[in-house]
Amino acid sequence: MMQTHTTSRSSHRARGLDRGFTLIEAIVVIVIIGVLAGIIAPPLFRRIVQSKQSAAAANAATIAGAVENYRLDYGELPQSLDALVVRTNDGKGHGPYINNSDQLLDPWGRPFRLVVPPQKNADFDIVSDGEDGQPGGPDDIVKP
């Protein structure tokens, strides 16, 4: 006769097979995750800020090139950066110098500014007010 082996819940507990996490173990895991997040997060956030500043500088340089092309075509600077997005009907086929008006926004979603007379360069400045959105701060991006 074949004997079936059944185990009761109490025998599982006695051997440690039906064991879950205790409150102490859960707290320790949460503390470890918190410490790791505290160590990793600050350098990650600094990197994000640096990448946005680099993107703003590259976009400002692209816009400055478009302003130079506009000046070569018309002999003067545009009245605003919005003129770079428009195709003119002057019969010469000038423009657009920027494909999309979204390219005139910095990584923080604010428009770049054309500053004449310039503060830094000879003819004009392309300026982003940086992360804080306030002119004149240390995070401003100014490109020729």
Image: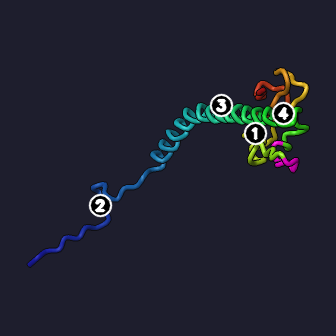
Residue denoted by label 3: 50
Q: Are marks 4 and 2 in contact (CB under 8 Å)?
A: no
Residue drawn where x is 80% and y is 34% of the image: 67
Q: Is tag 2's residue or tag 1's residue first in the polypeptide sequence?
A: 2
Mark 3–mark 1 distance (CA, rounded to whole Å) = 13 Å
Instruction: Please report the bounds of the magenta region as a residue range.
Output: 84-91
As drawn, the label of residue 106 is: 1
List the single residue furthest toward the left: 1
Residue drawn where x is 78% and y is 46% of the image: 96
Residues 47 and 107: in front is 107
Residue 123 at least partly seen: yes
Q: Is tag 3's residue or tag 2's residue first in the polypeptide sequence?
A: 2
As drawn, the label of residue 12 is: 2
Foreground disc of the pair 4, 2: 4
Which residue type does callout 4 highlight?
Arg
Percent position of residue 46, x then y: 63, 31
Residue drawn where x is 31% and y is 63% of the image: 10
Which residue type does callout 1 highlight?
Asp
Residue denoted by label 4: 71
Q: Are marks 3 and 2 in contact (CB under 8 Å)?
A: no
Mark 3–mark 2 distance (CA, rounded to whole Å) = 56 Å
